[in-house]
Structures are given as C-alpha cells and as structure tokens.
Amino acid sequence: MASWNFMVTPTKPSLSWKLSFLSPLTTVNVTRRQNRTAKGFVVFATVFLDPKPTVLVAEKLGEAGLELLKTFANVDCSYNLDHEELCTKISLCDALIVRSGTKVTREVFERSGGRLKVVGRAGVGIDNVDLSAATEHGCLVVNAPTANTIAAAEHGIALLTAMARNIAQADASIKSGKWQRSKYVGVSLVGKTLAVMGFGKVGSEVARRAKGLGMHVIAHDPYAPADRARAIGVDLVSFEEAISTADFISLHMPLTPATSKMFNDESFSQMKKGVRIVNVARGGVIDEEALVRALDSGTVAQAALDVFTEEPPSKDSKLVLHENVTVTPHLGASTTEAQEGVAIEVAEAVVGALKGQLAATAVNAPMLPAAILSELAPFVTLSEKLGRLAVQLVAGGSGVQSVKVTYASARGPDDLDTRLLRAMITKGLIEPISSVFINLVNADFSAKQRGLRITEERILLEGSPENPLEFIQVQIANVESKFSIAMSDSGEIKVEGRVKDRKPHLTKIGSFGVDVSMEGSLILCRQVDQPGMVGSVGSILGEENVNVSFMSVGRIAPRKQAVMTIGVDEEPSKEALKRIEEIPAVEEIVFLKL
Ligand SMILES: NC(=O)c1ccc[n+]([C@@H]2O[C@H](COP(=O)([O-])OP(=O)(O)OC[C@H]3O[C@@H](n4cnc5c(N)ncnc54)[C@H](O)[C@@H]3O)[C@@H](O)[C@H]2O)c1
Ligand SMILES: O=C(O)[C@H](O)COP(=O)(O)O
C-alpha cells in the first residue's frame, strides 16, 4: 500500500467531491494536527492509495490506449473470454474495456460485487452493454463517440459504390476463373437519391461524401436539427418519404427498442422497386428474414451489410449467402487510424473516471463541461452536506419520502444545470441511512427505488448572475425532527446553506438563522439563554478530549431561548453528549456528522 503526505489548506477546493462521483478507489485518511498558521488551519493529510486499479481489456485495443492505461492501472488484456470467464474475472476489476463483440450483461455487473466502476466502450454503439444494470450498480459507462466516425462513413461509401458496381461479386467471379463482363453491369450513383436514415455523426459524413459523388441526398432523423442538414444541402424528410423516394438507403441510427427491426416487411413494401440498401449501423435495425424476402422478390435489388443481428452470422445464413448481398465482418471502425483514436479516447475517459473525474463521454450520467464543473464545485460539496445534515435531523421512525430542494439564483434555468447538485443532495440524504453507495450515476435510480421523491424549485433572484447560486434549501416533508428548531413554520425540516469563499456554510436551520462553516461535525444545542453556557458545554467537551473548532450562539430573545452551534473535530462519546444534555438549561441536543 503506497502512502504519501500532502498539504491541504482551507482555501484549496475539497478533494472529496471529486472522489465521491465514483466509488472510493482511493481511501483518504486525514489527520488534522492543528498546526495553526497566520492563515488558519494547515491540514496534513496522509493519503493511502489502494494498489493500482485493474483494467480488464476484453477486446483488442490500440497500442496508444494500452500505454495510456498502463501509466495509471494494471492492465489485463484477456481477449476471447467467454461469458462465464468474464463473469469470473470481473470481481477483480475496477474497469472493463470492450468493443462490440462482448456482451456486458446484468450478470457481469452483479458478479462484479460492486468493484466494477467503469465500463469503457471502445467505439460508439453501446447496445452490447446493459445500461440499466450499469446504472443500478452505480457503474459509469463511457464510450468513444467520435474517433471512428470517418472510418464508418468511408466504409459506408465503400459499400455503396462496391454494391452499385458489383465489385465483390466480380472479384469472386474472376478469381474462380470466369470473365463475366455482361453479368456485372452496375448502376450509376450520380443523380440518384440517397436516403440517409439517422443524421448523426456518421450519417452526416456519409451525406457529405455522397453529395460529392453527385447524389441527391435526403435524410430522416426525428431528432436532428434541420439547419445542420440544410447547411450541407440535405433535406430532412419523414420516414415514409425517405424510404419511398430513395434509390439508395443508408442506415445510421443506433439500435434501440424504437429502431429494432424498423426495416421490415411493411417498410420494404413501401420502397421503390429495385432499391439498394447499405447498413453500417446495427444488424438489429433490419428484420433480416424480411430482407431476404424483399431481395428474393426484387423489391430490394441489392444490399451491402457490415453488421448483423447475430455476429458472426451463422455459416448458412440465407442473407449472407444471397448473391445480391455484399458483406463485410463489422469492419466499419476498423482502420488503423480509427482504432488508435478510439483506444486513446476510451483510455482517457476510463482513466479520468477512475480518478473520480466526470467523463465528457459518459453515457449514463450527466455530462457537464469542465468550466461549469469547476464553478459548481463548492455547491456540490454544499449540496451533499445539506442532504446529509437534513436527514440526520429526522427523528427515528419517520420515513423520508418527500424532499423539496430550492435553488435561489439570479441565473435563468437554462444557465443552471442542477443535475449534479440534485445527485449530491440525494447522496447526502441516502448514504447516512443505508449501506448503498450513491454516485452521480445511480443517484436518481436509488432515490426512485427507495420511494424518495425529490422535487426541485427555483427562486429567480434579481441582480448580477455572477455566482451560480445564492443559496440552496433542502426541506423534508411529513417527518418529525429530533431537533425541534429544525422544523420550519410550515412543518418541514428545513436547512439552508450558502457558499462563502468557496466553502459551504449552513445559514438556516428551520426558521432560525445561523452562520456556520460546514466542516467537521456539529453539535446543535437548544437551551435557555443564560450566562455560563458556553463555558459549561466547552469544559465537558474539553474533559472528553473533543476538540472544538468554533462555537456560536444565536438567541431568539435575551434570557429566553438560544441555539448553540459547536463545531467539533472528533465525534463526542454518548456519555459526553449525555452530560451536556443533563445541564439543566439545555433543552435538546443533536450531534450531526457532516
Ligand atoms: N459498422 C461500424 O463499425 C460502425 C462504426 C461506427 C458507428 N456505427 C454505428 O452507426 C450508428 C451511428 O453512429 P453515430 O456515431 O453516427 O451515432 P450518432 O448518435 O451520432 O447518430 C445517430 C443518429 O440516429 C438518430 N436516430 C435515433 N433514432 C432514430 C430513428 N428512429 N430514426 C432515424 N434516426 C434516428 C439520432 O438522432 C442520431 O442523430 C450507431 O448504431 C453506431 O453504433 C457502426
Ligand atoms: O459502434 C461502433 O463504434 C462500431 O460498431 C464499431 O464497433 P467495433 O469497435 O466492434 O469495431
């Protein structure tokens, strides 16, 4: 176990919010030696790092990506594992990298025993990863969405032109000793209509290239912006118009429940007789038996396929063996350049995720740009602490079901992404009362599973929106509190916090205003306002060897009621808390771990 020392001053941003996105690969033990300096505390922290994380690379990955992984992790390249071997190995791995050939099923996540923190897909399509299971297990899934786009588009164009000119069939014919010039007369592309189905990264690059070949290009994509299509001279049209007017159809949508077998008997029957189809997307978007029927009837003149419902397809597949079909074994992304790019893209994302950073290519977690993350960082800490504090104020026996979060900000809703804050409030609310580890990936799922309803509300403040937020309030409804002051006038537990000098501060408990730095732990004490209380409580804590970082007293009215807030470095023993509770003027007391 490696260990080293470093120094954290209170002005540095907290490490913990970063580490808490994912499971604690790193255990951080902080020992505060209370060296007071002119600036305040200097904290010497000893960080014990567990041995290097282990990354299982289950399919061939480019060398540059492997090198990058090795700088941070132990890398186990085990290609061609069967499902059982993968499930057996996975409990020893912190990350898994796959391409399209490995099925990352629910069982893989279950058998990882909670150790697997990130699955990296070295490519685009994540239909081979059970995303729901990953999310439920708090496992981040990242992909490499950009590095193979051009390779896939070029392969699409290669198949389109090869199909139109019977290249594969003619090649096989001549190699078998024949010379069949009249049999392999092709069709021209120029002036023909190509329908690009799915106008995303690959689809739009195919469209651009097809325009260069003189084709008339239309596209169907219910989610693509029309101006992006117009910018390259492509009209976005309905599904029916696309398939019924095209001479060539090229498929570029993801495989989802909505796109599964969307090319079937019915859609083939709407196509122009003699249409030609290219598929470099996913085999499952085509009903393959229906395609064989359409080829046999001549509705579809030719098909060029890089992908299949089952990969590899069976040796006697009618589709693969059809004389009007050209096939390649899922080669769309297989260029030297694309594979190096994909390997680097996925390795960077996996290493970043293992370091606890949010990945820009996360598939099952919100993605936030680095600048926004940095701005939100202190509010992330504040959010988790408010959730943690609020739930500890709930009296035993009352179940937490309804939580309202209010964000007060001068920024409009479009300028303030609260998903990260909500996830951290959820983490704070759930972790102290369960054994579940919550991170950004599984926060919403875990809340839903526990029947915890979190609603969010905005208060739009006037003034300059320089700070993302003025304050955050967390309210828990329909519960009793173990500290009566924490109940608001409307009957909910309410806590409110702000960020001051990038540090979280508790500014309200119930309707009672306080101003307390949210570091260490807190003792809240409601008492009769009378002289000597600070001394009595302070000396009990001193006798019990509990170090006090601050004490503040707020009064409802002189000589009536007061609330004392005491910051402590160590958890006081039950006896110490009991002794404080037994001071005659003390009416209630609660210890809260932040
Ligand atoms: N053969 C290969 O080796 C290879 C290589 C790269 C990508 N791919 C596959 O190609 C496909 C596209 O990849 P990409 O990087 O362009 O992804 P992308 O996410 O950039 O684009 C997909 C597009 O499909 C659209 N879409 C979603 N549902 C649709 C529907 N019902 N009808 C029409 N369009 C729909 C989306 O709006 C999006 O614009 C994916 O399936 C990917 O796995 C294959
Ligand atoms: O979705 C993808 O990125 C492609 O289908 C490539 O898959 P591969 O990594 O298995 O080549």
Image (tube, grey):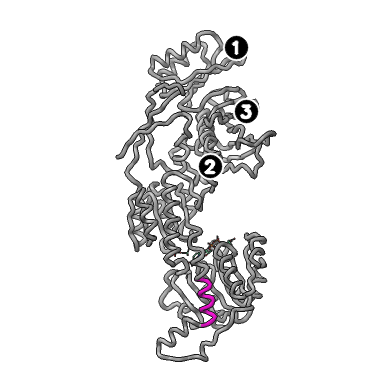
* Residue 494 higher or lower than 560, as above or below: below
Name the secondary structure under disc 3: loop
Q: Give the residue furthest to the left.
A: 1
First reached walking from the N terminus: tag 1 or tag 3: 3
Q: Residue at x 33, y 50 (%)?
A: 74
For the residue carrying disc 3, how many other residues have a C-alpha within 10 Å: few (<14), some (14-19), or many (20+)? some
Of the residues shown, which amino acid type is indicated by label 1?
A: Lys
| Residue occupying the point 47% across, 68% down | 332
Q: What residue is shown with label 3?
A: 491
Counting from the top left corner in percent of width and height, residue 441 is at 49, 47
| Span of residues in magenta | 155-165
Would you name the residue on which mark 1 appears? Answer: 560
Select label 1 or label 3 by which is in front.
1
Q: CA distance from mark 1 to mark 2?
A: 45 Å
At label 2, counting other C-alpha atoms closer than 10 Å, the crowd grade (few under 14, some 14-19, many 20 or more) is some
Residue at 45%, 27% in the rendered image = 520
**Are the residues tagged 3 and 2 within 8 Å (C-beta)?**
no
Residue in view at x 47 percent, y 11 percent: 535
State the residue lying farthest toward the top.
Answer: 531
Q: Which residue is mark 2?
A: 373
Instruction: Kindly report the distance in space between the C-alpha atoms of the residues bearing marks 3 and 2.
Output: 34 Å
Q: Quadrant of the N terminus?
A: top left
Q: Nearer the viewer, mark 1 or mark 2?
A: 2
Q: CA distance from mark 1 to mark 3?
A: 22 Å
